[in-house]
Structure formats: C-alpha cells, structure tokens
C-alpha cells in the first residue's frame, strides 16, 4: 500500500527517490509522483500508472534539486488519475505533501478550509493536509506540521516540504509506518527499509505522533508536545541482496526457494539441548494458570496460519483457541478479559486491522503475544511478547515463505505452552522437535520436484473455477492454497472442508472441474478418499497432495503430488509449498504479473 521516500543530501534527489520507490513497488500502487526543490522553485511531477510513466515525465524536466519527496499511491479516496496522485500542493503552491493512510475527518477539515477560501482540486483526503499545513504555517515548518497533525484523525505517514525551507523537510507518522534513514551528509525517510538500504543500514523507527525534522547533516525528532526525543539507532542486519531477485525471474519464486533456509533460521536458535527455549516469551507456568482461553487474530494468509495454530495449540497445550479475522474481531465486541492470551500474527507487523485488534485486546486486559516478521514494526513494538519469524524481507505480494515460518513459530509456541502446562510428555515433545528439524530438508525435496506441478498447471490454466478441499489441518491448508491461487492467477476458487461440500457446493462440480486435495492427515485419509470419489463421480479432475507412504491415494486421484513422509501434525509446512507452486505456475501460464497482482498491496495499512 502507498510508498513514501524522502531525500536530503548532495545527490540528485530524483534518481534517489525513484529508485527508492521502485524498491517499494511490491507494496502495490497505481500512480506516483515527486516534489523537488529545483533552483528556488518547488516542482511537482506526478501521473497515473507505473513508475516508468513517471520517469518519462520527469526526465525532460531536468530537475536538478537535491531535496525532495516521492510517493507511490494505492487509491482509496478518488480514482487513480494524475490529479489524485501525490504529492498534493497547498493553495499557494508553496507546500507539498505525500501521505500514506486515511484521514478519517477529512470532510470536516475540508469544509473548514473551504470556508477559509482554500480550493480543492482532487478527490483525495490528503489534499486537506497540504492546505492545513499552509493554514498553520507562520514561518516554522515543524510547528505547522505539529499543529496540523493535532487536528488529524485516522492514520498517516507524511512527508512535507516547503518552498521557504529549501534545506530541510519534515515528516510525521501515526498508525502508518515510517522510518528515517541516517546517512553521512544525507538523510532519508521511507515507508519501508528496502527503499533506502543501498544508502544506509542505520535507521530510526518513528513512533506514533512523532515529528522528524531533517537537514542533510542533522535529524531531530520531536513528540507531539514539542519536546525533543532521543532514539536508539536500529542497525539493519540483512543486506541489499535479500531484497533483490538474485537471478530469479520473480520474487515469489525466490521466496518459495528460500523456505528451507528460513524454516531452519526460525527453528534452530530456539532449540537448545533438544528443548524449546523461547527467550522472548516471558509467559510462565504460573501465568498460564490464569489463562483460560486463547484468541488468534490476523488477516489473510496470517489468519490461515492461525487456523492451523488453533488445531495444534488445542492438541498440544489443551487450551481452547478461537481464531478470528482481525477486521471482524475489533468490531464484534469480543469477550476478551485478563484471563485471555491473544496471539497476533502478521508478516509486515503493520496491517492496520491487526494492529487495532491488538490494541483492543490490550485495552480489555489480555496479554498479547505476536508472531511477526518485520523487526521493530508497530505490532512487534506494542506486544507484550514477540516471537520473530526469521523469514527475511518478503517482497512478493503473495505471502509464501512468511506463511511457512508462521506455522513453524506456531508449533514452537504450541509446544512451549504444552511444556509449561505439563500437557505433553517428554518423549512426544522430543519426537516432534526432532521431526521439526527435518522439515527444511523435506522442503528442499518438495522444491526439487516441481516439474509435475508445472506440467499440471500448463494443462489446466484455462480453468474458470477451482475447488480446494481438505479435512482437519488440510482444511486450513486448503484455505491458504485457494487464496494463493486467487490472488495471483485471478481464477475463481473456493476452499471447503471435505465433509462440507455435499451440503451445497457440490452442485458446482461438473465435468472437468478441478479439485485440489491436500491429504496429509493419516486419521482422515479414508474419509478424504470418499470425498474424492464423490467429486470424481460428478466429473471432477483431482490433484491430491500427500506423503509418499500414502499409496492408496494414487488409486483415487488423477494426479498425486508426493511430499516426503513427515508426521501429519507437521505436514502443513511442507504440503503448502506444492499449492504455492501451483498458484505460481497457473499465474505464469496466464501471463499475470505474479509479484504485483492487480488491486493488491503488500502491507495493508488502511482499514
Ligand atoms: O502483513 P500481514 O501478515 O499482517 O498481512 C496480512 C494479509 O494482508 C496478507 O497475508 C495477504 O493476505 C497476502 N496478500 C496473502 O498472500
């Protein structure tokens, strides 16, 4: 979702901004723009479409300035067009603003500003910010931004430059991520680290309602009361290559191929002398005595990981678990008390629905444990306990390696809680831990055997509708397999519990309908074979995914994708990958933009 980059230093700002924005393309956008100090003028260039369209518009203008702000917009208020693109300028043209997030009280502010004679030319909520900064401006840009954000409701990351301050600019944030990159004789702002990584690895992570004043040799941060804030520098440990394609055609393929490594990275540091040691989770056996229920709350793929989490926490730790979509949770007045543990799952750590669900849970007294990928993200910072998934940067919009690591983290949490509860015997725990350590090499085999999936996709990419069915943990996996296919290949798809199909949806199965069946749960295998027979009797073509040992599946399905023999309870980590690969190859066959699917954003920072 929208991207921001700002620069001040001795380099030409335009290439720094556009290269930075390219690194944020994965977030999703439909228009872009820059505002640059050019000689003594403030020049704004913006347009609908890809960054290449912006480059074509910028080049003839010879913008030579060394200070500027840039933006990629993912439309919320007003269609994607040149006028609604950012930056937006104030009435006099002296102030330019880029914004991520949504200003919820913009209508009220707009009416107020219109009464004061400000004219609006766009349909956006952002334009009020540009005019409001001008309204408050009395020669001090930091103060004008501070007075402005005091009046804003909603979420924002802002970059603001002013014609009368050619050697500085100002930024601020609330509920929308923004970092400050610290260089030598140059400084940056960005909505995410990859945008500035080729220039610096030292960053400040801004907190809500902090305002940053940037000059090329100085960065000062203030809180909303105007007091200066001293911050620790966060040093980014991963390198540029982690955020590049490194020879792969797509980020999605690169990220699937990284799954064995990132699973290893997530597990290994947490197992010491054969036992799970989660240093970051401070929940004691005594704390657990006071917890009578767990909620797992998340969105999209992270929610699907949560559905697996429910099964395994209940199985091992014997604590009831409810899984909720974050966007629903917050508004359904959930029955949360101080006797609940809320597990929040998020790759980005910035998903606004999930962040608000976290805050609602804390407000109601619950303890919050988050499973997050991005270090220092809002969700990580606001949680009581954080377990990081060491998936590294995930750039493709379709989440793959992050999902596998979220599952892995949930196994660690489930076993940790079970040990603290005394609800698992040592032998079982040791066996599961040993098998977990085999998951990376099992995944390497899955990834080496992708030719059958690619061939199957090349024969079926014209399918209009595809069903995913499974039972138990395989039902949870079906949801994720179906989402992956939809989001990148645009093929209609639904996920159903194997036993539920006949209660209505089987009416849609006809000759040639494709049905994908993960079948990794030993105790449910016979039941699933019956469900396959039901759909095949109505003409379906079935692709099953199962462990090598399950020979009987071959007789039931049209094609069987074999995965190594891992314990049923751990199989989701390896069985999801063939479904991710299937979605990928279907999208490639259809000529879709795999890494940047239409209408989607990587980090969903609006409600
Ligand atoms: O960053 P988060 O894990 O909080 O994101 C949640 C969802 O927006 C995300 O998983 C989304 O569903 C992905 N596009 C799935 O591939």
Image: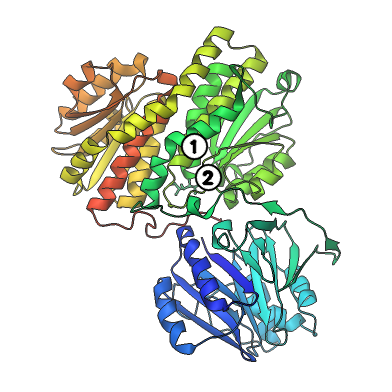
Task: Tell whether circle 2 marks a residue whose Cβ is less than 8 angstroms from ligand 1.
Answer: no
Please report the residue visible at 30 percent of the width from the left and 52 percent of the height from the top. 490
Please identify the quarter of the rendering in which residue 347 is found: top right
Left or right side of 107 for 207 = right
Dot 2 falls on a residue whose secondary structure is loop
State the image coordinates of residue 474 (x, y, percent, origin top left): 37, 27
Where does label 1 land, which residue?
A: 262
Dot 1 falls on a residue whose secondary structure is helix
Q: Neighbour class for label 2 at 10 Å: few (<14), some, many (≥20)?
A: many
Q: Earlier in the sequence, mark 1 or mark 2?
A: 1
Please identify the quarter of the rendering in which residue 294 is found: top right
Which of the pair 383/269 is nearer the observer? 269
Asked if 58 appears above or below 296 in the picture, the reply is below
Asked if 401 appears above or below 156 in the picture, the reply is above
Badge 1 vs badge 2, beta-carbon distance below 8 Å: yes
Please report the residue visible at 48 percent of the width from the left and 32 percent of the height from the top. 307
Q: Neighbour class for label 1 at 10 Å: few (<14), some, many (≥20)?
A: many
Q: Colour scheme in the image?
A: rainbow
- Answer yes or no: is residue 154 visible: no
State the image coordinates of residue 192 (x, y, percent, origin top left): 58, 58
State the image coordinates of residue 159 (x, y, percent, origin top left): 65, 71
Asked if 248 appears above or below 83 in the picture, the reply is above
Q: CA distance from mark 1 to mark 2?
A: 8 Å
């Amino acid at each position: 979702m929208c991207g921001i980059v700002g620069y001040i230093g001795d380099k030409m700002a335009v290439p720094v901004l556009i290269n930075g924005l390219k690194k944020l393309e994965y977030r999703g956008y439909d228009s872009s723009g820059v505002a640059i100090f050019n000689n003594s003028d403030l020049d704004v260039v913006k347009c609908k479409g890809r960054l290449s369209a912006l480059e074509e518009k910028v080049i003839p203008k010879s913008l030579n300035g060394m200070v500027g702000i840039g933006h990629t917009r993912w439309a919320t208020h007003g269609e994607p067009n040149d006028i609604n693109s950012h930056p937006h300028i104030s009435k006099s043209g002296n102030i330019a603003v880029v914004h991520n997030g949504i200003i919820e009280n913009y209508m009220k502010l707009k009416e107020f500003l219109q009464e004061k004679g400000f004219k609006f030319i766009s349909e956006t909520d952002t334009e009020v910010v540009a005019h409001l900064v001008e309204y408050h401006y009395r020669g001090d840009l930091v103060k004008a931004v501070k007075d402005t954000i005091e009046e804003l409701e909603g979420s924002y990351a802002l970059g603001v430059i002013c014609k009368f301050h050619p050697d500085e600019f100002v930024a601020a944030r609330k509920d929308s991520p923004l970092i400050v990159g610290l260089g030598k004789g140059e400084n940056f702002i960005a909505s995410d680290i990859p945008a500035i990584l080729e220039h610096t690895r030292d960053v400040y992570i801004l907190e809500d309602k902090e305002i940053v004043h940037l000059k090329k040799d100085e960065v000062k941060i203030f809180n909303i009361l105007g007091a200066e804030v001293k911050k620790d520098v966060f040093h980014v440990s991963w390198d540029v290559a982690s955020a590049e394609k490194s020879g792969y055609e797509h980020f999605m393929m690169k990220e699937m191929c990284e799954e064995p490594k990132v699973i290893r990275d997530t597990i290994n540091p947490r197992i010491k002398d054969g036992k799970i040691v989660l240093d970051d989770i401070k929940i004691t056996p005594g704390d657990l005595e006071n917890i009578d229920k767990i909620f797992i709350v998340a969105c999209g793929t992270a929610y699907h990981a949560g559905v697996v989490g429910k099964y395994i926490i209940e199985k091992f730790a014997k604590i009831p678990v409810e899984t909720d979509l974050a966007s629903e949770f917050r508004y359904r007045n959930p029955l949360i008390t101080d006797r609940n543990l809320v597990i929040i799952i998020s790759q980005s750590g910035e998903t606004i629905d999930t962040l608000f669900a976290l805050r609602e849970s804390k407000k109601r007294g619950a303890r919050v444990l988050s499973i997050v990928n991005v270090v220092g993200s809002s969700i990580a910072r606001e949680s009581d306990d954080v377990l990081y998934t060491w998936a590294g940067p995930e750039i493709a919009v379709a989440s793959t390696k992050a999902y596998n690591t979220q599952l892995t983290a949930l196994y660690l949490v489930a076993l940790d809680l079970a040990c603290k509860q005394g609800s698992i015997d040592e032998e079982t725990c040791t066996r599961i831990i040993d098998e977990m350590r085999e998951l990376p090499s099992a995944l390497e085999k899955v990834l080496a055997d992708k030719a059958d999936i690619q061939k199957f996709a090349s024969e079926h990419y014209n399918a209009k509708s595809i069903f995913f069915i499974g039972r138990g943990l395989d039902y949870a996996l079906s949801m994720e397999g179906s989402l992956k296919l939809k989001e990148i290949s645009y093929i209609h798809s639904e996920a159903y519990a194997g036993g539920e199909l006949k209660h209505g949806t089987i009416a849609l199965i006809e000759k040639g309908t494709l049905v994908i069946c993960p079948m990794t749960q030993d105790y449910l295998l016979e039941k699933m074979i019956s469900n396959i027979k039901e759909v095949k009797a109505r003409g379906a073509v079935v692709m099953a995914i199962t462990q090598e040992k399950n020979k009987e599946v071959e007789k039931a399905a049209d094609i069987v994708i074999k995965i190594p023999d891992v314990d049923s309870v751990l199989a989701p980590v390896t069985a999801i990958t063939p479904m991710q690969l299937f979605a990928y190859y279907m999208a490639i066959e259809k000529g879709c933009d795999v890494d940047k699917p239409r209408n989607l954003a990587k980090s969903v920072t609006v409600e």
